[in-house]
């Protein structure tokens, strides 16, 4: 349930930021404002989570640094660069091939093939992605936008892999400290001129209505950033990186519906089918993951029952 709540919150990011990009905001401005607000809002929960043990953050500085740079700053920046050129739905569906990268990495590292059900779920997701990308060419997709979305997928995989690392650092504290690192990194890139930052104070169009630019900024800073990262970090620790990353695919469905309602970005029929297939892989991978988690428990129980007999 926690994972689904986090996914729903994350889903507001693209639909809320795209109207800002439409009036002249640069992706760099959007991500800088988002991460800065998130860092401020997560500061108090972070301090409360460590309960005076701020040293635990320093002890895990490598994890915090990697999470902030790759899992937060990298993925967020690439996502907004992609959304500036693609629809929200296509960007998210490409980004959320990150779970497939996790499966591939685990396969490469352990040299042990995933369960057949996991492979079937991955294949289903890849087939759906082919439909979403419309390789036949009926829908024009910006090539550079797809590159940015692919890099966002790498950041997405890094996010789940790093949050899932066993650590004495509470997940909310990792989210807060990582957010601060990410905001500082994006701020440095902005000061160096590497990432252009341009903000426009003007009305935005959402769901056919004119609203102040402050509305989407506040929503983005609170829901898909401070709240979503905090909730999601807890979910990943509870479920594990692979399972949590696939459950988070529900964000795609939420975002597609929200983008349709707010931005009028209706997906083509083939893309809609592709989205269903991509998210359909969640059920298969979840089933395989839960089955894998049950095996050690059963073995441990068997061994514990047999041990007194051996004595």
Image (cartoon, helix red, strand yellow):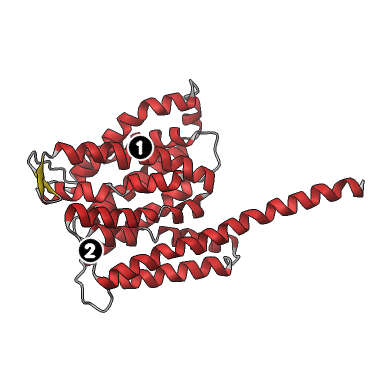
Q: Position of residue 137 (x, y in %)?
A: 22, 77
Q: Tag 1's secondary structure? A: helix
Dividing the picture into quadrants, the one containing residue 127 is bottom left
Query: In this orientation, which residue lies closer to the viewer: 81 or 17?
Result: 17
CA distance for labels 2 and 1: 30 Å
Q: Are marks 2 and 1 in contact (CB under 8 Å)?
A: no
Which mark identifies residue 227?
1
Q: Residue at x 40, y 33 (%)?
A: 177
Position of 37 with respect to 168 (left or right) is: left
Residue 181 drawn at (x, y percent): 35, 36
Indicate which disc residue 127 carries: none
Q: Which residue position holds label 2?
A: 144
The image quarter containing residue 81 is bottom left
What residue is drawn where x is 28% and y is 76%? Answer: 135
Residue 161 visible, this orientation: yes
Q: Secondary structure at mark 2?
A: helix
302 or 152: nearer the eye? 302
The answer, for residue 109, to whether it is visible in the render is no
Determine the residue positioned at 58% across, 56% down: 290
Query: For this rendering, which residue is in front, 26 or 243?
Result: 243
């Amino acid at each position: 349930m926690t994972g689904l709540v986090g996914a729903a919150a994350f889903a507001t990011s693209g639909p809320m930021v795209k109207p800002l990009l439409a009036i002249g905001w640069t992706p760099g401005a959007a991500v800088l404002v988002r991460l800065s607000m998130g860092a401020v809002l997560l500061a108090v929960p972070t301090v409360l989570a460590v309960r005076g043990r701020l040293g635990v953050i320093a002890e895990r500085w490598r994890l915090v640094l990697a999470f902030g740079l790759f899992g937060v700053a990298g993925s967020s920046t690439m996502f907004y660069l992609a959304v500036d050129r693609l629809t929200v739905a296509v960007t998210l569906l490409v980004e959320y091939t990150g779970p497939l990268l996790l499966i591939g990495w685990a396969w490469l590292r352990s040299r042990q093939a995933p369960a057949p059900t996991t492979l079937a779920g991955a294949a289903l997701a890849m087939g759906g992605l082919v439909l979403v990308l419309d390789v036949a060419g009926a829908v024009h997709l910006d090539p550079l936008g797809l590159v940015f979305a692919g890099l966002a997928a790498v950041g997405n995989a890094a996010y789940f892999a790093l949050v899932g690392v066993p650590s004495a650092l509470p997940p909310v504290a990792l989210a807060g400290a990582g957010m601060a690192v990410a905001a500082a990194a994006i701020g440095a890139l902005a000061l160096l001129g590497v990432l252009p930052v341009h903000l426009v104070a003007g009305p935005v169009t959402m769901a056919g209505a004119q609203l102040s630019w402050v509305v989407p900024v506040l929503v983005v800073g609170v829901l898909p950033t401070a709240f979503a990262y905090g909730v999601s970090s807890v979910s990943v620790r509870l479920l594990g990186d692979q399972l949590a990353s696939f459950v988070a695919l529900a964000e795609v469905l939420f975002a597609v519906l929200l983008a349709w309602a707010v931005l009028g970005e209706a997906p083509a029929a083939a893309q809609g089918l592709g989205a269903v297939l991509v998210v359909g892989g969640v059920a298969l991978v979840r089933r395989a993951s839960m089955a894998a988690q049950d095996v050690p428990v059963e073995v441990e129980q068997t061994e514990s029952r047999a041990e007194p007999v051996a004595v």
